[in-house]
Structures are given as structure tokens and as C-alpha cells.
Image (cartoon, helix red, strand yellow):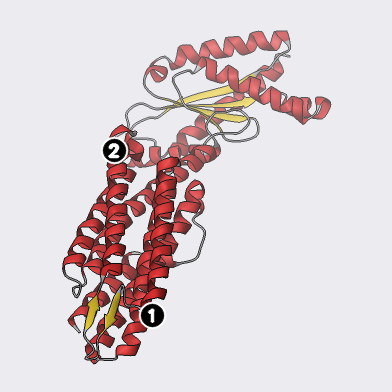
């Protein structure tokens, strides 16, 4: 039962570390690698079945159940070559490189599979791969050795190929090729040991180590891709689609960060300018919402051109906020006065105008962002009334 116990350990570890990959669900974050992951999942399934066949072989052989052991040996070899074929198909998809050499690898995988099927059929009549003698002792022959040697050559060849490609690849994909190379080398070593010691479970041990290595890198790749997709999604959500400035979602997050900095006492200088476009409703009502969108975009450009060193947020239909720190904070009065002068000129020309209100953080008095915002917002409405009164 020692032989079977190795298979039990390998199967349990296999199911534990790859549990998530046996769930039949789509991995939306990896859309461009969906084919690779489907093939990878099939490969993992074939390895699990191989382990089961290996466990049963050890149990049947120990109990002297020769007929059942014979049938299980056939299954053992079939799952072995199936896993080899699926491994090659999975790694080609995983590496994302197709060419004459990778096609040759897949062809070699099919040839090993077909060779083994033919050998097992012949073995029923003439023992060329294995047999159990009259006393129930297991014997191996040239057919089995040829199968193992073919696999050893294939694993070794794919490993050399992966190492060579890794040297010439970009750093972002280099680890993919190294993963394949390391796993292939491990399999080649343990297949060689299996050839030397046919009654030892070296092939199973090799599968256990090789799949563990692949799992580590594939899992890390998935986490990286998920973070990448999440970051891209976040960037989209944090960017206002119409104007290109930061969105209300980004504004809420920045406001919360500033509140934490105020609570911690780590903020010294902070200015808030609240902007509101004048006459947007009139534009929408008379010219339509498409013209209104252009009006909003034009107003946003006026703000961004003046406050070039400050993040600008669109927090409503025609409402914007700029948060001043650093250079813009030091020059806030000049920037605000210059902006107001430009708006007065624009009003005379009959083009886009924006009302604005500025206020700053007072350390020891202001407990949160909103307190500063409300003062700036009040000044903005005072400026708006002043601009309307001067029509």
C-alpha cells in the first residue's frame, strides 16, 4: 500500500491547490487567456484521473487482484499520455506563441497518444508494454519504455525551447516560459527515474511537483491580470467621460483621504475652488443638450488652463471643484483674480463664463473637507449673483 499512499497524497494536494480551477465558471478578468485556462483545466482534470488510476493500481496490485489491476494499468497508461497531450496544448496556449515548432510539439503529443493506444491494443494479444505473470508479478517491456522515453524527449525539448524563448522575451512574459521550462525539466527527471525503477511512483511524484510549480505561476498571473483589469476599470470610473477630468467617484475618494489627513494633523496647506457654469440651462433649453455638452466642455477647459497644477473634478452637471496644493496654493489669489478677469471678458464677448469661489483650510478650526467646501461654495454663489447683477 506504500505505492498507493504516494498517489493519495499527490491527489489530495492536487485537489487542494487547484480547487478553484475545477470550478466550471468563466474567469472574466482573463478574457484574452480564456482558451489557455480551459485547456489548463482539462490538463488538471487528466492529472487527477491519472492519480486515481495510480492509486487504484497500487491497491489492486497489493491485493493480488490481477484482472482488475490489468484493466487499471491500461487506464493508467491512457491517462498518462492524455495528460501529456493536454499539457502540451495548455502550455502552447499559455505561452501565446504559435509557429512551426509549437505545432510540432502538439503533433508529437498526439503521436505519443496514438502510439500508446496502438501499443495497448497489441498488448492484449502480445505483451509488448506490460504483463502480469501467472504468479501475479508485474513485468514491463519495451513498449512501456518507448512511451516513457518519448515523453522524456518531449518534455525536455519543450523545456529547452521555453528557456531559449525566455532569454529573448520581454520581462512580462519571460516568467511564463521559465515556468514551462522548470516544470518540463522536473517531469523529464522523474520520467528518467521511472524508467530505472518501474515499481516506484516517480512519475506521480514528478506530476505533483511540476503541477505545483505551474499552479504557482498561473495563480500569480491571474492575480496580476485581475489587479490590472481592476485598475483599468477604476481608471475608467475615475475619469469623467464628457470632459476627461476626474469624476465624482475620484472626488469622493480624494475628499475622504483629505478628511483622514485633517484628522491626523498631517495637512498644512489646502485650497478648494468651487466652479459653476453660468447659463447652461439656457443653452440646453434653446440649443439642445448636445450644445450644452459642448458648453460644459468649454467651461472645463477654461478651468484646466488656469489651474494647470491642480486636480479638477466634475462633481455635477455644471459643477467642478479644483483642489489646490503646492504651487497653485501659493499662487491661489493671483490665479483666482486672473480667472475672474477672464470670466468678465468672456461675459462681455457673450461666450462661456464660470462662477468660482475660493477658500482655504484653517488648521485647528476646520475638522473636515466639507467645512472648507461650504465656505468656497457660498463664495461661488456670491460671485454668480455679482455676475448676473452686472448684466
| Badge nearest the viewer, 1 or 2 | 1
The residue identified by callout 2 is: 164
Q: Is 354 left or right of 333, judged from the image as shown? A: right
Image coordinates of residue 28 in percent, x first then y, are 51, 53
Q: Is 123 left or right of 201, judged from the image as shown? A: right
Task: Identify the image quadrant of residue 133.
Answer: bottom left
Residue depicted at x 31% and y 58%: 150
Nearer-N-terminus badge (1/2):
1
| Mark 2 residue element | helix
Residue depicted at x 38% and y 17%: 327
Task: Identify the image quadrant of residue 247.
Answer: top right
For residue 225, say whether it is visible.
no
The residue identified by callout 1 is: 124
Q: Is residue 303 shown above or below 98?
A: above
Image coordinates of residue 17 in percent, x first then y, are 32, 65
For residue 88, say whether it is visible.
yes
**Looking at the image, which is closer to me, 85 or 116?**
116
Query: Looking at the rendering, in which quadrant would you find the C terminus?
Result: top right
Q: Residue furthest right?
A: 286
Amino acid at each position: 500500500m506504500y505505492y498507493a499512499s504516494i498517489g493519495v497524497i499527490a491527489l489530495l494536494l492536487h485537489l487542494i491547490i487547484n480547487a478553484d480551477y475545477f470550478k466550471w465558471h468563466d474567469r472574466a478578468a482573463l478574457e484574452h487567456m480564456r482558451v489557455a485556462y480551459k485547456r489548463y483545466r482539462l490538463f488538471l482534470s487528466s492529472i487527477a484521473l491519472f492519480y486515481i488510476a495510480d492509486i487504484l493500481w497500487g491497491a489492486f496490485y497489493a491485493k493480488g487482484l490481477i484482472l482488475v489491476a490489468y484493466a487499471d494499468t491500461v487506464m493508467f497508461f491512457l491517462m498518462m499520455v492524455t495528460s501529456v497531450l493536454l499539457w502540451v496544448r495548455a502550455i502552447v496556449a499559455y505561452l501565446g506563441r504559435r509557429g512551426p515548432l509549437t505545432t510540432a510539439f502538439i503533433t508529437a503529443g498526439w503521436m505519443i497518444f496514438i502510439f500508446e493506444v496502438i501499443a495497448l491494443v497489441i498488448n492484449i494479444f502480445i505483451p509488448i508494454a506490460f504483463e502480469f505473470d501467472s504468479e501475479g508479478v508485474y513485468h514491463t517491456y519495451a513498449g512501456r519504455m518507448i512511451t516513457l522515453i518519448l515523453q522524456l524527449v518531449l518534455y525536455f525539448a519543450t523545456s529547452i525551447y521555453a528557456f531559449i524563448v525566455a532569454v529573448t522575451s520581454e520581462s512580462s512574459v519571460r516568467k511564463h516560459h521559465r515556468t514551462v521550462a522548470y516544470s518540463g525539466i522536473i517531469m523529464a527527471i522523474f520520467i528518467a527515474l521511472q524508467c530505472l525503477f518501474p515499481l516506484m511512483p516517480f512519475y506521480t511524484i514528478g506530476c505533483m511537483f511540476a503541477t505545483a510549480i505551474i499552479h504557482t505561476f498561473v495563480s500569480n498571473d491571474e492575480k496580476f491580470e485581475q489587479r490590472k483589469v481592476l485598475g483599468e476599470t477604476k481608471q475608467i470610473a475615475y475619469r469623467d467621460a464628457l470632459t476627461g477630468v476626474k469624476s465624482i467617484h475620484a472626488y469622493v475618494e480624494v475628499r475622504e483621504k483629505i478628511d483622514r489627513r485633517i484628522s491626523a494633523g498631517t495637512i498644512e496647506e489646502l485650497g478648494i475652488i468651487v466652479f459653476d457654469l453660468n447659463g447652461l440651462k439656457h443653452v440646453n433649453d434653446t440649443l439642445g443638450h448636445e450644445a450644452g455638452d459642448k458648453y460644459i466642455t468649454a467651461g472645463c477647459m477654461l478651468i484646466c488652463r488656469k489651474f494647470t497644477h491642480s486636480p479638477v473634478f466634475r462633481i455635477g452637471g455644471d459643477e467642478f471643484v479644483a483642489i489646490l496644493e503646492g504651487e497653485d496654493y501659493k499662487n491661489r489669489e493671483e490665479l483666482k483674480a486672473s480667472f475672474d478677469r477672464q470670466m468678465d471678458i468672456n461675459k462681455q464677448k457673450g461666450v462661456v463664463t464660470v462662477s468660482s469661489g475660493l477658500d482655504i483650510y484653517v488648521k485647528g478650526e476646520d475638522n473636515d473637507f466639507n467645512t472648507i467646501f461650504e465656505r468656497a461654495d457660498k463664495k461661488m454663489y456670491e460671485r454668480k449673483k455679482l455676475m448676473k447683477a452686472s448684466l
